[in-house]
Image (cartoon, helix red, strand yellow):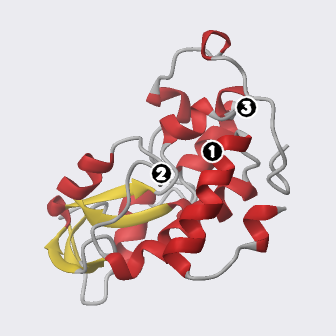
């Protein structure tokens, strides 16, 4: 299912176990350097010098351009790491069937993460692109393109009606017909 966005069988809501964010694990520290995915991503994405906490485990300051708002932030406390494809959205489309490790990998995959304004991220919540788009109109095509690349990589189930709406949205935002989403 979903490899070429074919019509997928979606489990009915009553068959899907209740979503719990804990089922995706927390931020991982894969290299065991005390910096978890959040802080490693903040360090990597900073376009200026990074300041760490006294123990070196947390990024506390840097310079980040939020692609959702086109605003620059310098304090990590003002930044959330957004799951482009929200965890709850993914859960409803098949992540509930994944192994615990695959869910943890998904939640920590840098291809599915953006450093963004915390308030903007909270307004997005668990919405997909049909219900929420970034305030920055210039970023919307990139947003939906990357969203669906992640959906395809993880073979999430997308109902035919939702896929058709997404194709139309992509074409409107990007000004091109999408062979990727039509297959």
* Residue at 59% from the left image edge and 32% from the top image edge: 91
Give the vertical position of 25 relative to 121 (above or below). above
Label 3 Cα crowd, 10 Å radius (few <14 / some 14-19 / many 20+): few
* Residue at 34% from the left image edge and 76% from the top image edge: 137
Distance of label 2 from label 1 (alpha carbons): 8 Å
User: Residue 39 at what x, y percent from top left?
Assistant: 36, 63
Q: Are marks 2 and 1 in contact (CB under 8 Å)?
A: yes
- Quarter location, residue 7: top right
- Label 3, secondary structure: give it: loop
Choose the circle earlier in sequence order: 1 or 3: 3
3 or 2: mark nearer the eye: 2
Label 1 Cα crowd, 10 Å radius (few <14 / some 14-19 / many 20+): few
- Label 1, secondary structure: give it: helix
Which quadrant of the figure contains the C terminus?
bottom right
Distance of label 3 from label 2 (alpha carbons): 27 Å
User: Residue 174 at what x, y percent from top left?
Assistant: 54, 79
Relative to 173, is 92 on the left or the right? right
Relative to 66, is 171 on the left or the right? right
* Residue at 73% from the left image edge and 42% from the top image edge: 160
Residue at the disc numbered 2: 130
Choose the circle earlier in sequence order: 3 or 2: 3
Residue 162: give its label: 1
Give the vertical position of 16 relative to 73 (above or below). above
Distance of label 1 from label 3 (alpha carbons): 25 Å
Could one spot residue 55 in this view of the protein?
A: yes
- Label 2, secondary structure: give it: loop
Q: Residue lying furthest top in this view?
A: 14
Residue at the disc numbered 3: 99
* Residue at 80% from the left image edge and 48% from the top image edge: 2
């Amino acid at each position: 299912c979903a490899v070429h966005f074919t019509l997928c069988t979606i489990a009915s809501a009553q068959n899907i176990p209740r979503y719990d964010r804990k089922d995706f694990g927390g931020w991982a520290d894969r290299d065991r350097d005390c910096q978890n995915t959040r802080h490693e991503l903040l360090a990597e994405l900073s376009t200026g010098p990074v300041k760490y906490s006294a123990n070196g485990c947390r990024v506390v300051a840097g310079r980040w351009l939020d692609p959702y708002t086109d605003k620059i932030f310098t304090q990590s406390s003002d930044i959330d790491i957004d799951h482009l494809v929200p965890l709850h959205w993914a859960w409803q489309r098949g992540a509930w069937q994944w192994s615990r490790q695959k869910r943890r990998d998904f939640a920590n995959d840098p291809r599915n993460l953006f450093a963004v304004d915390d308030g903007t991220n909270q307004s997005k919540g668990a919405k997909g692109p049909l219900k929420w788009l970034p305030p920055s109109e210039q970023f919307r095509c990139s947003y939906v393109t990357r969203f669906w690349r992640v959906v395809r990589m993880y073979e999430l189930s997308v109902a035919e009606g939702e896929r058709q709406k997404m194709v139309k949205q992509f074409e409107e935002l990007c000004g091109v017909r999408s062979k990727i989403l039509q297959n």
